[in-house]
Image: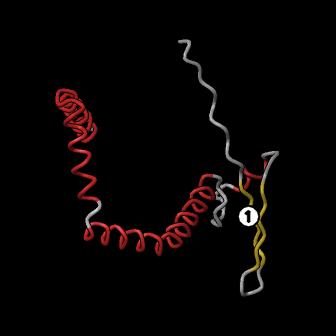
Amino acid sequence: MRGKMLLVVGLATGYVLGSRAGRQRYEQIKSASSSVWNLAPVQQVAGAVKEFAGQRVDTVQVKAGNATKKAVRSLLHLDDTPSKSTSSAAKTSKKSTSTSTSGSGKTSTVTMKPAQPAPATTDDE
């Protein structure tokens, strides 16, 4: 919360000081920053950062995809852990059953309850 407050104060201060400086000062700052951006050392570093990010984008996509799949499976209760109360899961009209075979030849069946939607609330009160 403190960081958000500092951001708002910084933006407000920048706006006030920038509006007082006027268009001429804005153009001066813009041309100075443009000349710094176009310097050879800055462009070399920018190119190196872009290349590094391009090499890592595939890894980031895979990791993000795996994390998303894991989160969705967790939210939908589709993880491979057996349910503690199989009797209550068997009573539901909609159920999901998963059968797997272990290396020893034993077959196990896991029944999971579907996720329940959150109750609707109104703001009339």
Instruction: Place residue 124 in its image quadrant.
Output: top right
Q: How many marks?
A: 1
Which residue in the structure is indicated by mark 1?
110
Q: Quadrant of the N terminus?
A: top left
- Residue 105, position as x, y percentages in the image: 77, 85
Looking at the image, which is closer to me, 22 or 103?
Answer: 22
| Residue drawn at the location 37% of the way across and 70% of the way down | 47
- Residue 10, position as x, y percentages in the image: 21, 36
Q: Name the amino acid, label 1.
A: Val
Element at label 1: strand
- Residue 108, position as x, y percentages in the image: 75, 72
Looking at the image, which is closer to me, 63 or 32?
Answer: 32
- Residue 86, position as x, y percentages in the image: 71, 56
Instruction: Place residue 3 in its image quadrant.
Output: top left
Question: With 103 as the anchor, is 41 left or right in this view?
Answer: left
Residue at the limit of the structure toward the right, as seen here: 93
Residue at the limit of the structure toward the top, as seen here: 125
- Is 4 rendered above or below residue 84? above
| Residue drawn at the location 31% of the way across and 67% of the way down | 43
Label 1 Cα neighbours within 10 Å, binned few <14 / some 14-19 / many ≥20: some
